[in-house]
């Protein structure tokens, strides 16, 4: 197995690590699996755990260093459960598992404090301290992965047996997505106006042909949420 360089900073969980996880899952050689985990997967897991603990202020949990070790063990036990065919990337999959694992510890700690203190405010305060934290990096990364998967889905729509007007609307959708950052859209009517200008269709034609892709998108979103 070739050694791969491990990157740091916000790119610590790269395609190298995604591929290594798949290699680990499909490998039947126990020694090789251990080597893959130790050399490639484990460093990424440890950094992910540390970042999540810091980001969501789980640092206030009692014996947090021991909990980090326990969380890693938990990730090892569920490592083989990852299924890339379900649409999510390994980073998203295991970061959600990690965050939920620590949230469970927060709730357990809150219950213990509640029993010791004898009132509900302890439980509420502990959960507020740990769960109501917003983090731009994870939010942006999730948005990026969502858009990547949505583009893959749109490519599938292109291969369908579309009518001329449906194809025009789909091309307009692609243009709007591609230039989303530079287009000013304040409401749904503005979107319809853009599509009308791009396709030269009237509002009724736009709405009728857009319905097909609404249905496709709803199905995609349900799969993504799962």
Image (cartoon, rainbow, N blue to C red):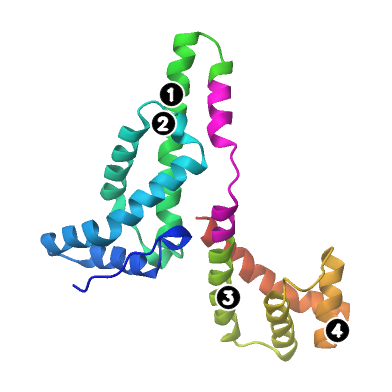
4 or 2: mark nearer the eye: 2
Earlier sequence position, callout 3 versus callout 2: 2
Would you say residue 152 sits in the magenta stretch?
Answer: no
Q: Secondary structure at mark 1?
A: helix
Labels 4 & 1 near each other (Cβ < 8 A): no
Q: Secondary structure at mark 2?
A: helix
What residue does disc 3 label?
151
Q: Secondary structure at mark 3?
A: helix
Span of residues in magenta = 123-142
Which mark is on residue 105? Answer: 2
Counting from the top left corner in percent of width and height, residue 71 is at: 33, 41
- Circle 3: is it few (<14), some (14-19), or many (20+) Cα within 10 Å? some
What residue does disc 1 label?
109
In which quarter of the view is residue 148 placed?
bottom right
Which mark is on residue 197? Answer: 4
Q: CA distance from mark 4 to mark 1?
A: 57 Å
The answer to whether 136 appears left or right of 102 in the picture is right
Q: Secondary structure at mark 4?
A: helix
């Amino acid at each position: 197995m070739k050694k791969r360089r491990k990157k740091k900073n916000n790119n610590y969980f790269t395609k190298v690590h995604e591929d290594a996880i798949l290699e680990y899952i499909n490998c039947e050689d126990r020694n090789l699996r251990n080597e893959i985990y130790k050399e490639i997967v484990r460093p990424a897991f440890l950094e992910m755990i540390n970042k999540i603990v810091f980001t969501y202020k789980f640092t206030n949990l009692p014996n947090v260093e021991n909990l980090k070790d326990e969380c890693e063990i938990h990730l090892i036990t569920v490592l083989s459960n990852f299924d890339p065919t379900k649409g999510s990337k390994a980073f998203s999959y295991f970061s959600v598992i990690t965050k939920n694992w620590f949230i469970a510890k927060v709730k357990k700690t809150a219950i213990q404090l509640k029993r010791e203190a004898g009132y509900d405010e302890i439980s509420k305060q502990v959960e507020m301290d740990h769960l109501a934290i917003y983090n731009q990096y994870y939010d942006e990364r999730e948005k990026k992965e969502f858009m990547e998967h949505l583009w893959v889905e749109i490519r599938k729509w292109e291969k369908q047996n579309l009518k001329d007007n449906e194809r025009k609307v789909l091309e307009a959708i692609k243009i709007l997505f591609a230039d989303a950052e530079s287009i000013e859209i304040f409401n749904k009517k503005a979107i319809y106006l853009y599509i009308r200008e791009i396709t030269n269709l009237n509002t009724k034609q736009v709405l009728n042909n857009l319905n097909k892709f609404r249905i496709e998108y709803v199905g995609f979103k349900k799969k993504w949420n799962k």
